[in-house]
Amino acid sequence: MFRSQLPRIYELRDLLPTPLPARAYFQDLDNTLTEWPQKLKQFRDIEADLQSLDDVAWSYLKGELAPLPITKHETRGWQQLFDKLNQAKAYRYLARIGCTDIRFIPESRNERERTPDLQAFTQGQNVLCEVKTINVSDDEANRFHNQSVGDSSDRLPEGFFRKLDAVLMEAIAQMQTYCSESDVRQIAYIITNFDDRLHEYADQYLVQINQFLQCNQATDLEVVLDMKPAFYVAQC
């Protein structure tokens, strides 16, 4: 029913065996998209990201995504699937800021030589981009899994900033290991899934994150924050 609207989503669905394994994603896809307007909206957003990929990039990412719809975590569900889909957001962002020759970098088989996710060029300058997703805390994942009642705060916990610092340091290391030339433009594309699932406090969180970046990052790294729904770019 929605195949014409979501062709690449359905390409992923078609990679799965029939009948679908019990723990696989995309169960009863047509009906759930009909019954849940918010899910249809989210899938249209994902499809728009996927449509920004050229054929080579889509073929690569689809291969990376193929095993993930049947990889379900006990409390975090199909988080790995959506973390990988987030790479298309960064690809689309690079295209939007005028980058060309955008490509995914295959992951190194050498664990000591971890690679960034994307490479591109803008006005002759080499651009590297690492995509990181900061997901909800273990407490929130367990609460949601158990359908327990919780509350949100307008202050981000210290644990969030420890995660943010760790992923930024890892992104820098991956990009510098891959290419140590001084004139490389380095971008960390950070998707944040807060414990505040409705993002009621997104504006307050943005101020706190920007203050943290200004105080703690002393490099030329560009940090792009994709905060669902807020979108913000920080230079630090």
Image (cartoon, rainbow, N blue to C red):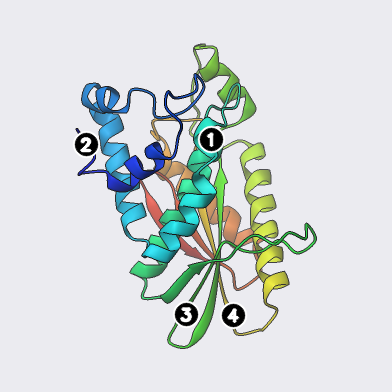
- Out of 4 and 153, give the one closest to the viewer: 4
- Out of 74 and 94, give the one closest to the viewer: 74
What type is the residue that disc 1 sits on? Gln
**Residue at figure coordinates x 43%, y 46% from the top left:** 227
Q: CA distance from mark 4 to mark 1?
A: 31 Å
Give whichever of discs 2 and 4 has the lower sequence position. Answer: 2
Q: CA distance from mark 2 to mark 4?
A: 42 Å
What type is the residue that disc 2 sits on? Phe
Residue on which the image places disc 3: 121
Q: Is residue 74 positioned above or below 69 on the image? A: above
Quarter holding residue 88: bottom left
Residue on which the image places disc 1: 79
Give whichever of discs 3 and 2 has the lower sequence position. Answer: 2
- Out of 218 and 26, give the one closest to the viewer: 26
Residue on which the image places disc 2: 2
Quarter holding residue 214: bottom right
**Side (left or right) of 53 relative to 22:** left
What type is the residue that disc 3 sits on? Phe
Circle 4 residues within 10 Å: few <14, some 14–19, many ≥20: some
Q: Position of residue 100 (x, y in %)?
A: 40, 77
Residue on which the image places disc 4: 184
In this rendering, which labeled residue sits more in front, label 2 or label 4? 2
Give whichever of discs 2 and 1 has the lower sequence position. Answer: 2
Q: Secondary structure at mark 3?
A: strand
Q: Secondary structure at mark 2?
A: loop
**Side (left or right) of 179 relative to 87:** right
Q: CA distance from mark 3 to mark 2?
A: 35 Å
Circle 2 residues within 10 Å: few <14, some 14–19, many ≥20: some
**Residue at figure coordinates x 60%, y 85% from the top left:** 183
